[in-house]
Image: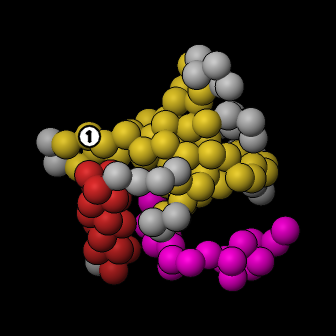
Amino acid sequence: MSNRDIEERRKHQRSDAQSLLYYICLDEDCENVQQGMGKTLNVSLDGILLETHVAIEPNYMVALSIGLADQTVDIGGSVVHTAKGENGMFHTGIEFRKLDAEAREALETFIAAFEKNRNH
């Protein structure tokens, strides 16, 4: 599937601004199997494209910690695709699981901050 095909299937427009996020990968037994920092390549209310130094396996669930001012919110998701980028880094598409009101509000704030930074 090409990036264009993925873009056309999305319900929400993605912001292309970049930010670092902390992630934790969990296996089917909810055991922490990997963690690190990733760079946000784009984000929407549906999901995020994360760039990391190591591959994130498709069978992992991912918990992302989004920090805004003095608030940190954890948002969970499932890996829907992963590929090695031209720069040697790994690009992983993560689809968010159902968001509660607090997580959705934090994500909307996060996206708005990206759009503001991108436009300045």
Q: Residues within 10 Å of mark 1 (few under 14, many from 20)?
A: few
Where residue 46 appears, x then y in whole percent? 52, 64
Residue at the (52%, 51%) spot, across then down: 97
Q: Indicate whether residue 18 is drawn in magenta.
A: yes
The residue that appears at 62% across and 75% down in the rendered structure is 10
Residue 59 to residue 1: above or below: above
Task: Please give left or right for residue 26 compared with residue 17 in the image.
Answer: right
SS under mark 1: strand
Q: Of residues 65 and 30, which is closer to you in this image?
A: 30
Residue at 74 percent across and 53 percent down: it is: 81
> Number of marks in the image?
1
Q: Is residue 98 above or below residue 75?
A: below
Q: Judge whether 40 appears above or below 111 on screen.
A: above
Q: Position of residue 4 (x, y in %)?
A: 74, 79
Q: Is 12 a magenta residue?
A: yes
Measuring 33% from the left and 59% from the top, which residue is drawn there? 104
The image shows residue 12 at horizontal and vertical percentages of 51, 77
Label 1 belongs to which residue? Answer: 72
51 lies left or right of 101: right
In this rendered view, identify the residue nearer to me: 4 or 103: 103
Q: Residue furthest right?
A: 1
Which image quarter: residue 8? bottom right
**Residue segment shown in magenta:** 1-19
